[in-house]
Image (spheres, coloured by chain):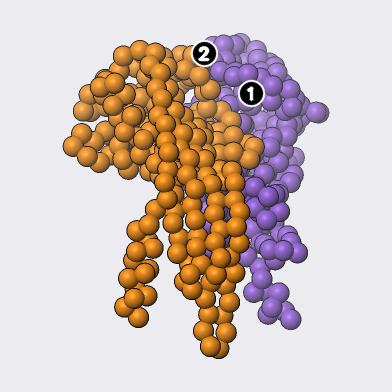
């Protein structure tokens, strides 16, 4: 029983390899005051792609912690406060449209009231690009177990487009790509060796976004 | 057998936030008629794979439209089914009637996608003070939501609430730009002008500030009045 417990703990600690790459392009200088905030908005389009809410929440968690946390406004609250201008089909698609949007009654005042300085649009998703192997599990009155091995490869590709709402310009883009293969080995009990490319992309993108916003990179 | 069938039906009472739109007010006092079907709209459907669904979106839809119309028009009053008498129309400039033409949804097992999705086709009709139709428009709202294996009801709730929200956004932004509405507002203003109507109203009608993105411009073609 103890061995089984150790095996379960060990299996949860096993993780697969992930390779990731972060790239950045800057259009203008940035900086943020302590009273200013940023908003992370996931892009949603009406096809089979949509930025997972869990990904933007992951970035928000990373940005909101540490020695120099950045003040964040939740995307649901922001979308409600600025309804109907940041809905999937009405949101501005480029920073050039901000000037016209700010002429709408109440929009500029509402943004100023919560001191939102930057808007970061998060676009992308994590997809399974390959999978294979086989594993079967059986259970009977004499016991049971799993035998075999399966794997799946995932690719996480995301981009953050950062707009400065004070100057109404695009300040730059950061892209994060991560790739990893996870395995599930059946050795009586199933032993997962999980690669988490989505998590790697989130942390890489969030750390780069923090450095970008405060003007360190 | 009845018990088995009932246990396979997922019931969803749609609930969500009701944001107040930040849009230019249409300078008109409108009577708004919500039919019983609109107030209590329910959708029932049975899929071979995922069982039956009973989706009640009437209350959320009603709350959303009550808030939307209160922000969209200078004045709003709920009215009974038209025609209204001259006396009932005395303090109103027209009547606004929203209805639901179609509702549909898809689960990942049907669509093969990662999301639950919902769509609502609204029909919005407007009549002037004497009951002449100004126009009617069909607007489709879409919503989609990620869903876990054991939270399909939450995902359908969220997708439906987003579809209501999307339809409402289209109405809030695009209704004032419709040529029939513009013409009606202009003629209403001309009638009021000699007897000192509200001066601010005319300015906001003649210089609508609603932005027109390439996407909304394209969609405007699809919501042209068919009356």
Helix, strand, or loop for circle 1? helix
Which chain identifier belongs to the purple chain? B
Which subunit holds the residue at mark 1? B
Q: Give the residue displayed 47% in from the left and 17% down from the top.
A: A95
The spot of residue B204 in percent (x, y) is 54, 15
Q: Give the residue displayed 53% in from the left and 22% down from the top.
A: A93
Q: Which mark is residue A105?
A: none
Which residue in the structure is indicated by mark 2?
Answer: B199
The spot of residue A189 in percent (x, y) is 47, 71
Task: Answer whether residue A85 is visible to the viewer in this image.
Answer: yes
Q: Give the residue displayed 71% in from the left and 74% down from the top.
A: B5
Q: Residue furthest bottom?
A: A141
Image quadrant of residue B27? top right
**Mark pair 2, 1: CA separation:** 29 Å
Vertical side of B47 occupied by A130: above or below? above
Which subunit holds the residue at mark 2? B
């Amino acid at each position: 029983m103890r061995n089984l417990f150790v095996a379960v703990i060990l299996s949860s600690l096993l993780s697969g390899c992930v390779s990731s790459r972060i790239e950045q392009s800057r259009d203008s200088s940035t900086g943020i005051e302590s009273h200013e905030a940023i908003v992370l908005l996931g892009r949603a389009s009406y096809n089979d792609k949509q930025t997972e809410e869990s990904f933007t929440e992951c970035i928000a968690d990373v940005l909101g912690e540490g020695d120099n946390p950045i003040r964040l406004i939740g995307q649901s609250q922001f979308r409600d406060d600025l309804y109907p201008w940041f809905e999937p089909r009405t949101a501005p698609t480029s920073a050039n449209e901000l000037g016209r949007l700010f002429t709408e009654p109440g929009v500029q005042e509402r943004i100023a009231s919560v001191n939102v300085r930057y808007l970061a649009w998060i676009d992308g998703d994590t997809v399974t690009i390959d999978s294979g192997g086989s594993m079967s599990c059986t259970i009977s009155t004499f016991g049971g177990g799993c035998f075999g091995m399966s794997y799946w490869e995932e690719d996480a590709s995301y981009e953050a487009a950062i707009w400065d709402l004070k100057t109404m310009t695009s300040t730059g883009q950061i892209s994060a790509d991560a790739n990893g293969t996870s395995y599930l080995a059946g050795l009586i009990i199933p032993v997962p060796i999980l690669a988490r490319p989505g998590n790697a992309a989130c942390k890489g993108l969030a750390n780069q976004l923090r450095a970008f916003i405060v003007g360190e990179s | 057998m009845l018990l088995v069938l009932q246990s396979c039906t997922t019931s969803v009472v749609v609930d969500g936030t009701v944001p107040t739109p930040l849009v230019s007010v249409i300078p008109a006092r409108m009577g708004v008629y919500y039919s019983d079907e609109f107030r209590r709209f329910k959708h029932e459907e049975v899929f071979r794979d995922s069982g039956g669904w009973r989706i009640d979106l009437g209350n959320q839809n009603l709350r959303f439209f009550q808030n939307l119309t209160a922000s969209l028009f200078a004045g709003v009053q709920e009215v009974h089914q038209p025609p209204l008498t001259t006396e009932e129309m005395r303090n109103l400039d027209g009547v606004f009637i929203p209805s639901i033409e179609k509702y549909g949804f898809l689960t990942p097992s049907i669509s093969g996608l990662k999301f639950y999705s919902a769509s609502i086709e609204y029909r919005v009709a407007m009549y002037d003070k004497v009951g002449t139709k100004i126009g009617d428009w069909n607007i489709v709202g879409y919503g989609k939501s990620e869903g876990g294996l054991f939270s399909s009801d939450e995902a359908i709730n969220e997708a439906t609430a987003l579809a209501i929200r999307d339809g409402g956004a289209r109405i809030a932004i695009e209704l004032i730009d419709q040529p029939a509405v513009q013409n009606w507002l202009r003629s209403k203003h001309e009638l009021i002008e000699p007897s000192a109507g509200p001066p601010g109203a005319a300015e906001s009608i003649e210089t609508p500030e609603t932005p027109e993105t390439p996407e909304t411009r394209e969609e405007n073609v699809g919501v042209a009045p068919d009356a």
